[in-house]
Amino acid sequence: MEILLDTANIEQIKKYMQLYNITGVTTNPTIISREQEKDFWKLTTTIREIVGDKQLHVQVTSDNWEEMLEEAEAIQIRLGKDTYIKIPAVEQGICAMKHIKEDGGRVTATAIYTPQQAMLAASVGADYVAPYYNRMNNLNVDSKKAIGDIVNLFRQHNKHTKILGASFKNTQQIMDVLMVGGEAVTVSGDLLTTMVKNAVIDFAVDGFIKDWKSVYGDKKLYEL
Ligand code: G3P
């Protein structure tokens, strides 16, 4: 079970890497464009420094495989050969994935809306496929079923490509991916907080503190 952070925000990355067991960070051009730091390499290098040897996924921006490969090479030189090159699972992207895998690089196939895209990405050896849960829902696709189909497809054909669920708007969607056998999810820090924060949980925890204080006052147990 892998949890990644879908953000390029330095403060969020620092905060949630300290709080949770985070496998890595995923970015895409939209996520990058939201940050104040407009120097792409400065931003991504800082993220690399923070994540250390954990995963970093960085997306290419070209629409043809030759330029995608040039971008992939630049990412590998600047951010490390072990950086996952995120590539949309379109025809040119699949071709670029094939070359990167032949060259020993790491690949995350992104913008996955259908099992057939996932199948083609896995056929060229992608390390991860990233199905877009909420965006699939918005197309009236049963995302949970479609991702379950991808899980079964990879199992039946002995593919080692992992599923990295993405595009989440609520915590149920995240759990759906993991419940049908997806190995990884990439999420906002806010949704992680939402998972463990609500009035009922707070009520239970406040009750423990209140009962402790009724006997021991403000003393901590290490002070007794
Ligand atoms: O990782 C892909 C993800 O960032 C897309 O999410 O919220 O734009 O659908 P969203």
Image (cartoon, grey):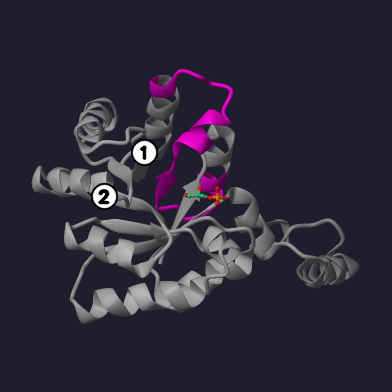
Query: Dot 1: few (<14), some (14–19), or many (≥20) neighbours within 10 Å?
Result: many
What number is the disc on residue 222?
none
What number is the disc on residue 58?
1
The residue shown at (84%, 65%) is 216
The residue shown at (32%, 52%) is 89
Marks 1/2: CA distance?
A: 19 Å
Number of on-image labels: 2
Is the CB atom of the residue marked by disc 2 within 8 angstroms of ligand 1's nearest atom? no
Q: Nearer the viewer, residue 169 or 135?
A: 135
Position of the N terminus, as image quadrant, is bottom left
Position of 36 relative to 224 (above/below): above
x and y percent of residue 6 in the render?
50, 47
Q: Nearer the viewer, residue 219 or 209?
A: 209
Position of the C terminus, as image quadrant, is bottom right
Q: Which residue is mark 2?
A: 91
Q: Quadrant of residue 120?
A: bottom left
Position of 184 relative to 143 (above/below): above
- The amino acid type, in three-letter code, at marker 2 is Glu
Q: Is residue 222 magenta?
A: no
Q: Nearer the viewer, residue 64 or 13?
A: 64
